[in-house]
Every structure is written in structure tokens, then in C-alpha cells.
Amino acid sequence: MAHKVIDRLGGVEEATVFGRSTTAPAAVAAAFNSDITYALDADDTLFDSAHFATIVVSSARAEAERVDASGDSLLRAVAVGYDMTARLNLACSFMEVVDGRSPRTSETAGGYSTVP
């Protein structure tokens, strides 16, 4: 079903989408690849159940493909994305102390940490 959505969205073909022979706009490829990584349970778990790789790696990979970046640049982008996600997760962890809820910061922190 997601493949049909990608086809309907159209746009400039910039980055690889897992499981497809064609490419899609970088933002669409990053979102789809992040979702498929979650679905396959191929994500990591760090800092109190935060899942960095699904969002950071998918976004960095799509953007690197879009701008034809080097492997070194891709690795740097992933490292910076992990650092930003960790910092944002730690900054948001006060919620658990204040009201006892376990915050869901992976999605928020991951999104902000992947902005180019």
C-alpha cells in the first residue's frame, strides 16, 4: 500500500526506496525507509528506549543520495544526527521525573535531528 502512495505523490526521483526499482523524492524515501525499518524491527534501542537509527540513518542516507555526498559525509551526518537525537532525548527526559510518564521522544527528537 505504501508503494501506491509513493507513486501517487510523484515528484523528483532523488533517493532509493527499499523494495523498489525506482527512486522517489528524498523526503518521501526517508519517511518510507524509516517506516519499513520500524516494521522490520531493525531499529536500535538507546537511552531509555529511543530508536535513533530508523529516523537518522534513513534521512541521512536519502539526503546523501540526493546531493551525491561522499561516504564520509554520510557517516558524519549520521554521527551528528545521533548526537542531536541523544541531546534532545535527554533534554525531554524531565517529563518522566515531573509526572511519572515515560516520554516518547524518539519521533520528535529524530525529526528535529534530521533537518538538513
Image: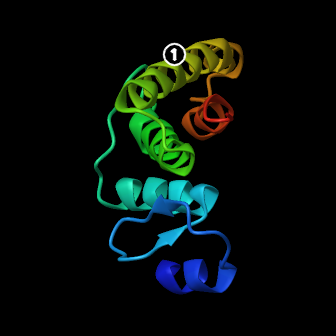
Residue 29, position as x, y percentages in the image? 52, 61
Residue at 52% x, 19% y: name it.
Answer: 80
Residue at 36% x, 32% y: name it.
Answer: 71
Number of marks drawn: 1
The image shows residue 8, relative to residue 48, as above or below, that is below
Question: Of 12 and 60, which appears nearest the observer?
Answer: 12
Question: Of 79 and 106, which appears nearest the observer?
Answer: 79
Residue 65, position as x, y percentages in the image? 48, 49
Q: Which of the colour schemes (rainbow, by chain, secondary structure, one colour) is used?
A: rainbow
**Residue 98 as seen in the image, left or right of residue 51:** right
- The picture quadrant where one finds residue 27 is bottom right
Residue at 71% x, 14% y: name it.
Answer: 98
Which residue does the numbered mark 1 point to in the structure image?
Answer: 83
The image shows residue 20, relative to residue 81, as above or below, that is below
Dot 1: element: helix
Question: Of 64 and 41, which appears nearest the observer?
Answer: 64
Residue 34, position as x, y percentages in the image? 46, 53
Q: Residues within 10 Å of mark 1 (few under 14, many from 20)?
A: some
Residue at 56% x, 44% y: name it.
Answer: 67
- The picture quadrant where one finds residue 63 is top right
Q: Name the residue type under label 1.
A: Asp
The quadrant of the picture occupied by the C terminus is: top right
Question: Of 115 and 16, which appears nearest the observer?
Answer: 16
